[in-house]
Structures are given as structure tokens and as C-alpha cells.
Amino acid sequence: MATNGPDPSEFLERAQRMLRELFVDPRSDGDPWAEAMRSGARRAEREPSPERQRENLTFALATRAVEALEDLALNVAAIRQRLERTDAKAPGPETGSTGPGSTDASSE
């Protein structure tokens, strides 16, 4: 069966050639200065500006401060609950108490 379309191997060769041409830098003529300038420009595009770095740092510090305040609030709530439980369990003042907070005249 004869077809009028291109040969599949010919199609693959052309596609590979087009990809090579697309990804090969035609300016790479071995000039080290040109390569250094291109890599420096690429690096400058990736690095945020000093203003953007300052904004990122400020945001990170503010986020950590909020997290620390949340942790502190949780700790205070836990301490308050613990104190409320111990206050509820503690009996009223007894006359014969010899605990660490009692004032016993015989121990002096």
C-alpha cells in the first residue's frame, strides 16, 4: 500500500533536527565573555531584588512572630486549665494540715 505522506523515519529526522536547532544556542561561538554575560543575566533574573528580599524576610519574620504568639497563648491556656483543675481538687483549709504551706508551731 503506497501512501503520499512522508516516510516516518524522515519525519523523525526532521523533528530531531528542529529540536536540536531549537535548543542549541547559535550565539555559543566559544566567546567566554559572551557566555559569562549570558550566565550573569540569567542569574540576575533568578535572584530577587534587594527590595523583594527585604519583603520576603519581613514576611517570614512576621509569620514566625505570629506562630510564637500562638504557641504562647496555647501554653497560657494550658497552664490556666491546670491551675483550675488543681484549685478544684484542693480541699478547703483544714485545721490539722501539715502540708508544705502550713504553719506548724512544733516544727520551728
Image (spheres, grey):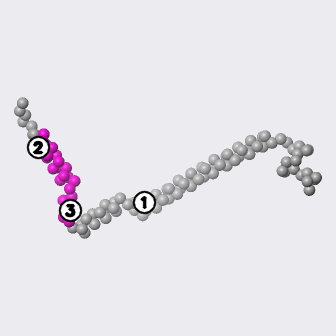
SS category of the residue bearing label 1:
helix
Q: Residue at x 17, y 53 (%)?
A: 21
Name which quarter of the figure residue 39 lies in.
bottom left
For this view, does 29 lie left or right of residue 103?
left
Residue at the disc numbered 3: 28
Q: Residue furthest top?
A: 1
The magenta-colored residue range is 8-30
The x, y position of residue 101, in whole percent, is 84, 51
Q: Position of residue 107 (x, y in %)?
A: 91, 54
Magenta segment, principal secondary structure?
helix
Closer-to-camera residue (101/45) = 101
Q: Earlier in the sequence, mark 3 or mark 1?
A: 3
Give the residue displayed 89% in from the left and 52% down from the top.
103
Residue drawn at x 44%, y 61% as measured from the top left: 53
Number of the label disc, if any, that sits on residue 93:
none
Residue 10 tag number? 2
Q: Residue furthest right?
A: 106
> Which quadrant is home to the N terminus?
top left
Question: Which residue is found at the position 35% from the left and 59% from the top?
Answer: 46
Amino acid beneath label 3: Ser
What x and y, as percent, mark residue 52?
Answer: 42, 60
Q: Which mark is residue 52?
A: 1
